[in-house]
Amino acid sequence: MALLRSVVVGCGAYLPETIVTNAALAERGIETSDEWIVQRTGIRQRHIAGPDETTSVLGTKAAQAALDEAGLSPADIDLVICATSTPDHTFPSTATQIQAALGIEGGFAFDLQAVCAGFVYAVATADRFLSTGGAKRALVIGAETFSRIVDWEDRTTCVLFGDGAGAIVLEARENDASDRGVLTSCLRSDGRHRSKLYVDGGPGSTGTTGKLRMEGREVFRFAVGSVTDVIEEAFRTSGTTADDLTWFVPHQANRRIIEASADKLGIAREKVVLTVDRHGNTSAASIPLALAAARSDGRIKEGDLVMIEAIGGGFTWGAALIRW
Ligand code: UT7
């Protein structure tokens, strides 16, 4: 039997209309400045969801945009994975709410929680279903409303995050000479780092949602120092090198982390897709948002070799190499 590959056939995104600039945060009484935020993170603005814009609302719009690009209808989808740490409710899953909102009646849907690494985990998971015949077409979504779980009194974290959603459609296709599809993925986690990035509540502990807490400097150190292992492994297992990459689309947390990682891996700066300036850190949504931005402005084209990579709370981290 021919090898099945998970091929990207559509990509889309949705950002809430409300844009909040760094200056607007300072005007709201947060003891910060545009200069500090830009210099330390590269962030200039972020989108913030309105009261009725839940994670499933954002995710549904991004998923619809991805289906539109693919020229598919919801009935063509038999797997929905939503990577999120800000679900509408503890249960049912946000993925099932998106499934219902799109009018999908068959297949199966579930959430995947690996914080900022969620989208990479979701791509790797969908790929396993598609490449083994467990599903035919998957919507892989990253959707977040981190504005609801940041502590707006804590300037060390609240200035960093934003809301949004992005999605891709993956289709199981027999591998051919085009070599398109998810070529490899590599996932890691190490729960000993829990205290460096976590939410101080939850349904099974406090019975509350809780707020995000982060030791920024520690996360920064780990992100730059350790997570390149998964990218190096993805290069090794696929027999590719940094020179072969067309685009590097990392999780968008901090411009300094992204550029330091690219430099360390020998990835040329012009291959790096950056959206952190416009979106801030949208956790699991940041990679599909960046993919959609680079797709819609004509940078990512069919046949391009694209590396996605992220690190999130846990810690969790991972990379996937995709021939678009
Ligand atoms: O998506 C999950 C992964 N998360 C990340 O990747 C985040 C990783 N960490 C980072 O991006 C950076 O560590 C931060 C952007 C969070 C912080 O940058 P930093 O260069 O590590 O700054 P710092 O925490 O060492 O703080 C430097 C100073 C401190 O003042 P003192 O102690 O030197 O007087 C902070 O109190 O900056 C101060 N500061 C601020 N000043 C103005 C902290 N937050 C702010 C702020 N505005 N918003």
Image: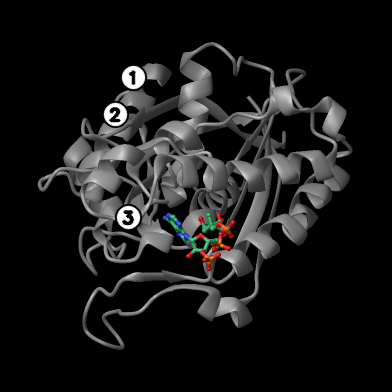
Answer whether residue 251 is visible to the viewer in this image: no
The picture places residue 165, in percent across and down from the top left corner, at 35, 39
Q: At 21% from the left edge and 79% from the top edge, which residue is drawn?
A: 208
Circle 2 Cα neighbour tier, 10 Å, few/some/many (<14 / 14–19 / ≥20): many
Marks 2,1: beta carbons within 8 A: yes
Q: Amino acid at mark 1?
A: Asp
Q: At 78% from the left edge and 46% from the top edge, which residue is drawn?
A: 234
Q: Which mark is residue 41?
A: none
Work out how far the residue at label 3 is from the one at label 1, CA to CA, in angstroms. Answer: 26 Å
SS at badge 3: helix
Front position among marks 3 and 1: 3
Front position among marks 2 and 3: 3
Residue that label 1 marks: 68
Q: Is residue 300 left or right of residue 213?
A: right
Give the mark nearest the N terminus, 3 or 1.
Answer: 1
Residue that protrudes farthest toward the left in the picture:
52
- Residue 190 lies, with reference to residue 103, above or below; the image says below
Residue that protrudes farthest toward the bottom in the picture:
205
The picture places residue 103, in percent across and down from the top left corner, at 19, 37
Q: Amino acid at mark 3?
A: Phe
Q: Is residue 256 left or right of residue 209?
A: right
Work out how far the residue at label 2 is from the one at label 1, CA to CA, in angstroms. Answer: 6 Å
Q: Which mark is residue 146?
A: 3
SS at badge 2: helix
The picture places residue 56, in percent across and down from the top left corner, at 23, 47
Marks 2,3: beta carbons within 8 A: no
Answer whether residue 293 is visible to the viewer in this image: yes
